[in-house]
């Protein structure tokens, strides 16, 4: 072999995490073995003294006669057996003439016990915690400014909550606030659950203007109280403060009040030039389409920068959605001023409807209204044109409110869904896949609520079954020797993201989880309802985030290079470990699809 063992090993993660002493120790405790094609390396149920690192060739891992996985150059097998001490759960058979390094189990275990990062790598991968797994691959030196967007609300709560009961005298509440030097007092019940809030501004009105010195707090508190969970990102709390037009936000943990934060508390975290905060504030204040266009011109690069610096997809997509939603609402309000409009609600579908927008986003919208179609079509056309002008491209498939097919009264929308559920053609199944991710953006939400109630009442088991078949119709590109079609690039949206989102939507539809459109939130609700086991839900969530992050990172690199991002992943352009996790994610998707096929019996009769 031309490459000395130590030099070969040091280039492979996680062995690259090891210092020279550990590398030397591993090298001194390994053997080299050549296996002819068809040779059994380890039998299922047997113990072995080694961890196996493939230098050349391909090794198949079999459960009896069923091929479960393949490992090739630079990949390791036998780790779980080494860590747990259990026998091999699969048989390892050489599928080609192969050469393996055999690392003695005792030596591996010693390094595993002494190097936390090395151990964490294998432990997180075995447990399919892909987010923790890929975090280990990132540089740990230094920080970036945008990490403040991921700070949790509980991290900026500096004081114990100042609270009182509803029957407390207003004057007593005022004294308590003065004593504790706070600008608000939270009204709670006996279990510290928030009922309302009273601020110093409210007290001045009560005591000075209304003279209500003998009043009770419950008579003047603001209720219901606006609150945020302590584990939410600070950025999300800031969005809530701005959207609700308030200055004090109650913080809760396990349904109990744990503190209060203000706009000032949050803004102290942010530099005036911080990209997304500045952008969001400017968008909310914009009065013209040209102003919006100017503010949004740099959003793709801002998002690309955050992605490259390591902000995770779930956090980043929330931020992107907040900025885009605000931009759309401001655009609609600007255009509204030229029209006398009936009751209507502007709806988003697709990735925007699921709050999963990334860089390559376009318009997917429709309208439910109660008035003249001609007026609403003219209005929608101006909104769609304006959105395109500010930098949100039109949908190439014309899923937009300016299309007469998607600009309808409530009764017309109900008729659409009635037809789609009863006549399960390929076209109607496609429409259901698009329009079952409806999310209201602006307008009369009651129209949306009534349509959702209608959908719940009219969905049929047969429609669910057809949607299940559609969601599982495209198999992940898993082949005997790795990923099929890898030489031409893999469409990660087609083979990874869509199968998960569509399969989860099927389960959500059956369980009447329709108002919740976000895939992660749907999975969590399905887990709470025991529709998905905790293990399966965790595997799907880990895979979905990894796939979305790989897609986002791929698009971000393109945008940074001045190119248009797409969904095609070329294995030669990504880290070897990312390629390994990609294959694991596709296995999880394949298992999930088998679960869906079995649950809805879609293999029969199609």
Image: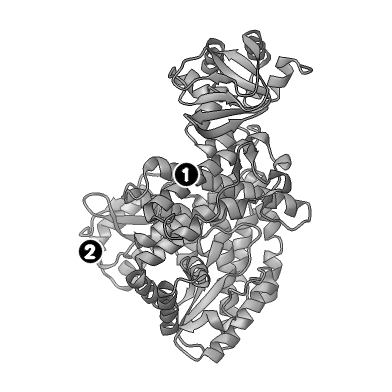
Residue 483 at x, y percent in the picture: 63, 41
Residue 544 at x, y percent in the picture: 53, 48
Q: Which residue is mark 2?
A: 216
Residue 599 horizontal side relative to residue 234, left or right: left
Q: Nearer the viewer, residue 350 or 169?
A: 350
Examine the rendered structure and indicate whether residue 48 appears above or below residue 259. Answer: above
**Quarter containing the N terminus:** top right
Regarding residue 231, the answer to whether it shows in the image is: yes
Q: Residues within 10 Å of mark 1 (few under 14, many from 20)?
A: some
Please report whichever mark, 1 or 2, sits nearer to the chain's N-terminal start: 2
Residue 193 horizontal side relative to residue 291, left or right: left
Residue 430 at x, y percent in the picture: 52, 68
Between the C-alphas of marks 1 and 2, the distance is 59 Å
Q: Quadrant of residue 70?
A: top right
Instruction: Look at 22% across and 63% down and name the residue there.
Output: 216
For residue 591, the mark is: 1
Instruction: Look at 31% across and 65% down and name the residue there.
Output: 223
For residue 517, the mark is: none
Q: Quadrant of residue 504?
A: bottom left
Residue 56 horizontal side relative to residue 251, left or right: right
Q: Residues within 10 Å of mark 2 (few under 14, many from 20)?
A: some
Q: Nearer the viewer, residue 536 or 349?
A: 536
Which colour scheme appears in the figure?
one colour
Q: Secondary structure at mark 2?
A: loop
Instruction: Look at 58% across and 29% down and name the residue there.
Output: 60
Residue 138 at x, y percent in the picture: 64, 35
Q: Quadrant of residue 387?
A: bottom right
């Amino acid at each position: 072999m031309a490459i000395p063992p130590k030099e070969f090993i040091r280039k492979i993660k996680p062995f690259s995490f090891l210092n020279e002493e550990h590398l030397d120790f591993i090298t001194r405790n390994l053997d080299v073995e050549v296996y002819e094609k068809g040779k059994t390396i380890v039998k299922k149920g047997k113990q072995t003294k080694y961890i196996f690192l493939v230098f050349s060739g391909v090794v198949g891992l079999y459960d009896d006669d069923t091929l479960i996985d393949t490992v090739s150059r630079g990949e390791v097998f036998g780790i779980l057996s080494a860590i747990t001490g259990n026998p091999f759960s699969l048989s390892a058979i050489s599928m080609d003439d192969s050469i393996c390094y055999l690392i003695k189990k005792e030596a591996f275990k010693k390094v595993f016990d002494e190097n936390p990062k090395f151990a964490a790598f294998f432990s997180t991968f075995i447990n399919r915690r892909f987010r923790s797994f890929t975090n280990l691959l990132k540089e740990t030196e230094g920080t970036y400014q945008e990490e403040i967007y991921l700070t949790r609300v509980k991290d900026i709560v500096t004081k114990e909550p100042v609270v009182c009961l509803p029957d407390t005298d207003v004057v007593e509440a005022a004294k308590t606030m003065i004593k504790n030097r706070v600008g608000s007092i939270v009204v709670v019940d006996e279990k510290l659950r928030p009922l309302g809030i009273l601020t110093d501004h409210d007290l001045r009105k009560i005591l000075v203007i209304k003279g209500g010195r003998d009043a009770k707090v419950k008579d003047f508190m603001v209720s219901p109280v606006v609150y945020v969970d302590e584990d939410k990102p600070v950025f999300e709390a800031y969005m809530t403060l701005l959207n609700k037009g308030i200055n004090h936000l109650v913080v809760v943990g396990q349904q109990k009040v744990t503190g209060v934060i203000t706009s000032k508390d949050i803004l102290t975290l942010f530099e005036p030039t911080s990209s997304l905060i500045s952008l969001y504030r400017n968008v909310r204040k914009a009065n013209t389409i040209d102003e919006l266009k100017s503010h949004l011109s740099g959003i793709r690069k801002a998002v690309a920068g955050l992605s490259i610096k390591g902000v995770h997809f779930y956090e980043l997509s929330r931020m992107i959605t907040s900025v885009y939603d605000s931009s759309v609402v401001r655009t609609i309000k600007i255009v509204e001023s030229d029209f006398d409009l009936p009751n209507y609600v502007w709806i988003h579908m697709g990735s925007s409807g699921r709050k999963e927008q990334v860089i390559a986003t376009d318009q997917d919208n429709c309208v439910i209204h109660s008035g003249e179609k001609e007026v609403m079509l003219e209005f929608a056309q101006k909104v769609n044109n304006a959105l395109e002008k500010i930098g949100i491209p039109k949908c190439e498939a014309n899923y937009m409110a300016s299309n007469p097919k998607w600009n309808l009264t409530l009764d017309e929308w109900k008729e659409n869904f009635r037809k789609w559920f009863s006549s399960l053609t390929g076209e109607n199944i496609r429409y259901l896949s698009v329009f079952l991710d409806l999310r209201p953006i602006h307008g009369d939400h009651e129209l949306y609520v009534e349509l959702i109630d209608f959908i719940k009442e009219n969905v049929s088991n047969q429609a669910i079954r057809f949607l299940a078949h559609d969601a599982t119709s495209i198999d992940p590109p898993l082949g005997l020797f790795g990923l099929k079609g890898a030489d031409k690039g893999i469409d990660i949206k087609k083979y990874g993201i869509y199968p998960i989102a569509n399969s989860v939507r099927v389960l959500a539809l059956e369980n009447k989880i329709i108002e919740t459109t976000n895939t992660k939130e749907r999975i969590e609700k399905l887990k709470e309802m025991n529709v998905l086991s905790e293990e399966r839900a965790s595997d799907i969530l880990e895979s979905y985030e990894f796939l979305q992050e790989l897609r986002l990172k791929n698009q971000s690199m393109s945008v940074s290079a001045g190119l248009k991002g797409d969904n095609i992943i070329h294995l030669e352009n990504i880290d070897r470990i990312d390629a390994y996790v990609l294959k694991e994610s596709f296995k999880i998707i394949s298992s999930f699809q088998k679960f869906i096929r079995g649950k809805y019996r879609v293999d029969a009769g199609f």
